[in-house]
Amino acid sequence: MARESLFAILSRQPWWVSLLVAALLFAVVQLVLPPLAPFVALPFIAVAAYVAWTQLRRTSPVNVEERLAALRAMPWENFRLVISEAYRRQGYTVEESGGGAFDFKLRKDGRTTLVQCRRWKVNQVGVGPVRELFEALSKHDAFNCVCIAAGEFSGNAREFAAGKPATLLNGAALVELVGTIEKTSRRWFTS
């Protein structure tokens, strides 16, 4: 069984846990070897700062629901622009499809990804659209595919995508994808 480092364990805890460990270590070492106390506590302070930063950037569950509601309220044109811009910012070349099983072709590092997001307002996406997108993979010589929804995916859709080069993107992952776009381009989030 592989052992985890203390820093890996602390990185999954709330930020104040690392700060508490730093304070305790500082107090103990201060009693024994006072000149070394700051140097012993410093790595834990750095971990606390890193964890605080990542936790600050993370979206709360309430905020996720608000953002998903804002995405559902968007007209197709705005939603399409937000998704394509989000992928452009990740370094993809985005090409709109002329119809069919997918909405965008993404290209990066010589690989093609098909993206379908036209059913973003649906409460639950079934297996049909996911199957249709997956079948388009071989027809378009794509590496993988992504099906995007602001709602949920049915159990059948999740079961179908399991083990295949198909990603079902919704919820917090969708909010994270468009998060930077929302902050910099409010005009798309107001119709």
Image: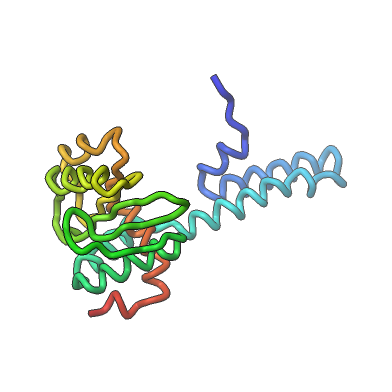
Vertical comparison of 157 with 110: above or below: above
Q: Quadrant of the N terminus?
A: top right
The quarter holding residue 122 reads bottom left
The reply, left or right, for residue 73 in relation to residue 27 is: left
Q: Residue at x 84, y 44 (%)?
A: 36
Q: Is residue 55 left or right of residue 39?
A: left
Name the colouring of the figure. rainbow
Residue 33 placement (x, y as % from top left): 86, 40
Q: Nearer the viewer, residue 12 or 133?
A: 133
Instruction: Tell me where residue 105 sits by quadrant.
Output: bottom left
Q: Nearer the viewer, residue 24 or 107?
A: 107
Measured from the top left, where is residue 126 in percent x and y?
13, 46
Q: Position of residue 58 (x, y in %)?
A: 44, 56
**Camera-side residue: 181 or 88?**
88
The residue located at (27%, 35%) in the rendering is 162
- Residue 83 vertical position relative to residue 11 in the rendered view, above or below: below
**Left or right: residue 59 compared with residue 140:** right
Q: Is 70 placed above or below 190 here?
A: above
Is residue 159 shown above or below 72?
above
Question: How many numbered marks, from 0 up?
Answer: 0
Left or right: 154 in relation to 27: left
Q: Quadrant of residue 80?
A: bottom left
Q: Relative to the observer, which residue lies in front, 64 or 88? A: 88
Residue drawn at point x = 27 percent, y = 49 percent: 140
Q: Residue at x 64, y 43 (%)?
A: 21
Q: Position of residue 62 (x, y in %)?
A: 31, 59
